[in-house]
Each structure stands twice: as structure tokens, then as C-alpha cells.
Image: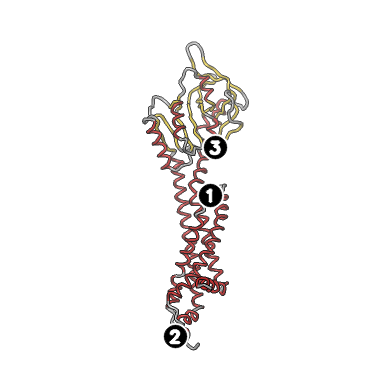
């Protein structure tokens, strides 16, 4: 039998001989490793999860024309779209606001791409359906109450007014929009309606909104890039309420994760240290006998640290596996979706488990080195 095999057999036998005590220590390590592994996965995947959650509350990057006298053209829209090709964009909506009339009563009409609006404004609640055809519109709840709009009915709207005629179009109300905000006072439809009602006007957008799963710093970089490539023509703004709220939530969750992890590791440290202290107290005579037979401090330290390493490795491996399931459960309960688990979390968890176990053994091993063979073996 080689020296290494003998050493491994010796420390394994020492652990198995005290199963009940060592079970407490290893359970503590497993629990600590599970929490470290699971919370590490949540922490690393948290930015993506938060971005996806906050995208439900609307766009976070807004583009405007730097020239107050004109809006953003179709070419500007295509330029923004091209600049965002390498970015994971949830949605990109362009809005053009105009005044139309119903029986000489003015109202605001917004022409946009309804399919994209559903991506940038997923929080919109629509009674009925979203417009699909070129003669269908969506009206806000406030507007519907003011003009007594009914779902499924068509109304004649007046757009451009010239000296000879008024441009009219008959549009069908297919949905009533409820948001609790200013959108309820606006009617929405596809851009084809604006072209029909205002044939002589050049298509220009008042603003373009993008919903991008990125943090505040990354959004600023994207905005500055587009500002530069457009020769300062396309300005940008961040939706401060969304981006600042996302940053605050991220910071608070990060602080909570580190706090919980630190507390659990401290409890693990205390539990393992207490267990090892009691084990060394039981083995005082064994340690004294080894010293009497010529074992030096290096041998004693190596034996106890070997036991600690074995406990730390086993507990770390099992805890890392359990942490994977822990992260999945927490992800489903908190975010409603699975959390990505990076494979390198496993060696990191094992390393942390080893460090905690070794640190917990510092005082017990120090006490073991202070054992005096003449005192503990007196009378034997």
C-alpha cells in the first residue's frame, strides 16, 4: 500500500469512526454549498431576469429628432434599426401623432406599427382586438367614453382639409385600450391610415421607442453610438423611471444575496469549527500517543486538514448539485422562469467549501498542536 493510499484510508477511517459528529459538519457544509451555488447562479443570471421582467413595463430607450422643427424620417428609423441589429432588441416602435376629426370634434390619432407596439408595450390591456387591417383602429378608454365608440362599429374620420375637399376615411373600432395613462386619450392605427388621411404630408415620426434588455450604461452607449452615426441628428433619452428602478432593484437584490450568503457561510463556519473542536477533544489521547511515538506537528496538521479537505470536497460537490435545483426552484418562484446555471459555479462552490472548512479547522488544529503527551497519557 502506497503512502498516499494509507493516508487516505487513515483520514477516511477517522471520519467514519465518528459518523454522528461528522454528519453534522458535512450537513452544514452541504447546506452552505447549496446556498452559495444556488445564489451564485441567481446573482449571475439576475441582470437578464430583471431586464426581461422590466421589459413588460414598456420601452427603456427613446429616440427624438434634435431639430424641434422636424421629426424623424423613415430613413432615420431604418438607421436606428440597422444600428440595433447586433443588439437583442425586444421591440422598436415609431409613433406619429396627428389631429383628426369626428363630426368636427378633434381627437389625437397615432399611426404606428401595431405589431411592434405589442412588443414595446406588453402591459397594454385591450378589450377586443388589436388592429390588423388598414381600416381598423384602437381607441383609448377615455376617448371611447367621450365619443361613445362601440366595438365593431365604423366611423368616418376627417384628416387633411383642403380648399376644395376634406380627406375622409371610414375606420372600424376593433379594440378599446386601457393603460391608466395618457394613452387612453389617443386613437391608434397602422401607418397606412395616416397616408390615407394625410396624403400630401411627408411621413415623419415624433418619436421612436426601443425596448432593449440592457442596463443603463449599455443603453447610454447604444444611444451615443446612434447620435454619433447620425451626425447629432437623432437624439436619445432613457426612460428614467424604468432604468433607475431596474438599477435600484438590482442593487437591493445583490445586497440581499451577499448578506444571506455571508450569514449562511458564517453559520457553516461556526458549526464545522465547533464539531472539529469536539472531535479533537475526544482524540486528545490519540494525538498525545502519536506525538509520544515521534509524530511532529506537520503530521498532526496534515491529518486534520486532510479530514477537513475530504469533508469540504464531498460537501461542496453535493451542495453544488443541490444548488442547481435550488436555483431552478427560486427562479421559477421569483421570476416565473428557469435560471441559467453556469458550469464553472461547481468548482467555485467546491473551492469556497474547502476554504470555509479549512478556516473552521484553524482554532481546533491549533489546540491539537498544544496537546502535551505527558499530561494526556499520564496514568496510561
| For the residues bearing labels 2 and 3, Cβ distance under 8 angstroms | no
Mark 1 residue crowding within 10 angstroms, few (<14) / some (14–19) / many (20+): some
**To which residue does mark 2 refer?**
374
Is 140 above or below relative to 41? above
**To which residue does mark 3 refer?**
122
Q: CA distance from mark 1 to mark 2?
A: 58 Å
Dot 1 falls on a residue whose secondary structure is loop
**To which residue does mark 1 refer?**
340
Foreground disc of the pair 2, 3:
2
Q: Residue at x 47, y 61 (%)?
A: 352
Dot 3 falls on a residue whose secondary structure is loop
Q: Residue at x 50, y 78 (%)?
A: 283
Q: Residue at x 50, y 49 (%)?
A: 45
Furthest-right residue in this view: 152
Residues 339 and 117: in front is 339
Residues 69 and 79: in front is 79
Q: Position of residue 357 (x, y in %)?
A: 48, 66
Mark 2 residue crowding within 10 angstroms, few (<14) / some (14–19) / many (20+): few
Q: Position of residue 244 (x, y in %)?
A: 43, 43
Toward which corner of the image does residue 80 lie, by quadrant?
Answer: top left
Q: Position of residue 139 (x, y in %)?
A: 55, 28
Which numbered disc flags the more N-terminal residue, 1 or 2?
1
| For the residues bearing labels 1 and 2, Cβ distance under 8 angstroms | no
**Left of 278 or right of it: where is 64?**
left
Amino acid at each position: 500500500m502506497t503512502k498516499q493510499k494509507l493516508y487516505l484510508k487513515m483520514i477516511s477511517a477517522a471520519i467514519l469512526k465518528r459518523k454522528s459528529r461528522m454528519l453534522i459538519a458535512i450537513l452544514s457544509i452541504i447546506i452552505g454549498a447549496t446556498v452559495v451555488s444556488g445564489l451564485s447562479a441567481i446573482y449571475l443570471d439576475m441582470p437578464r431576469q430583471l431586464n426581461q421582467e422590466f421589459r413588460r413595463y414598456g420601452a427603456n430607450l427613446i429616440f427624438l429628432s434634435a431639430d424641434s422643427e422636424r421629426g424623424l424620417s423613415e430613413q432615420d428609423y431604418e438607421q436606428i434599426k440597422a444600428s440595433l441589429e447586433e443588439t437583442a432588441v425586444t421591440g422598436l416602435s415609431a409613433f406619429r401623432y396627428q389631429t383628426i376629426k369626428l363630426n368636427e370634434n378633434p381627437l389625437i390619432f397615432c399611426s404606428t406599427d401595431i405589431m411592434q407596439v405589442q412588443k414595446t408595450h406588453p402591459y397594454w390591456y385591450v378589450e377586443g382586438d388589436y388592429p390588423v387591417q388598414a381600416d381598423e383602429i384602437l381607441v383609448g378608454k377615455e376617448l371611447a367614453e367621450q365619443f361613445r365608440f362601440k366595438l365593431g362599429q365604423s366611423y368616418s374620420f376627417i384628416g387633411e382639409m383642403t380648399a376644395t375637399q376634406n380627406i375622409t376615411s371610414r375606420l372600424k373600432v376593433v379594440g378599446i385600450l386601457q393603460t391608466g395613462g395618457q394613452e387612453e386619450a389617443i386613437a391608434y392605427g397602422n401607418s397606412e391610415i395616416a397616408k390615407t388621411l394625410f396624403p400630401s404630408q411627408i411621413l415623419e415620426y415624433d418619436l421612436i421607442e426601443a425596448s432593449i434588455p440592457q442596463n443603463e450604461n449599455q443603453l447610454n452607449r447604444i444611444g451615443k453610438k446612434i447620435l454619433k452615426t447620425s451626425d447629432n441628428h437623432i437624439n436619445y433619452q432613457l426612460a428614467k423611471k424604468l432604468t433607475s428602478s431596474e438599477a435600484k432593484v438590482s442593487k437591493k437584490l445583490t445586497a440581499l444575496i451577499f448578506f444571506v450568503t455571508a450569514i449562511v457561510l458564517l453559520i457553516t463556519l461556526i458549526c464545522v469549527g465547533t464539531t472539529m473542536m469536539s472531535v479533537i477533544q475526544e482524540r486528545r489521547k490519540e494525538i498525545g500517543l502519536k506525538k509520544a511515538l515521534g509524530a511532529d506537528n506537520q503530521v498532526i496538521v496534515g491529518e486534520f486538514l486532510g479530514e477537513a479537505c475530504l469533508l469540504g470536497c464531498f460537501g461542496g460537490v453535493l451542495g453544488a448539485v443541490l444548488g442547481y435545483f435550488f436555483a431552478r426552484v427560486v427562479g421559477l418562484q421569483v421570476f416565473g422562469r428557469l435560471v441559467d446555471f453556469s458550469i464553472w459555479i461547481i468548482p467555485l462552490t467546491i473551492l469556497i467549501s474547502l476554504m470555509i472548512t479549512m478556516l473552521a479547522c484553524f482554532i481546533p488544529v491549533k489546540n491539537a498542536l498544544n496537546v502535551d503527551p505527558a499530561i494526556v497519557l499520564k496514568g496510561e
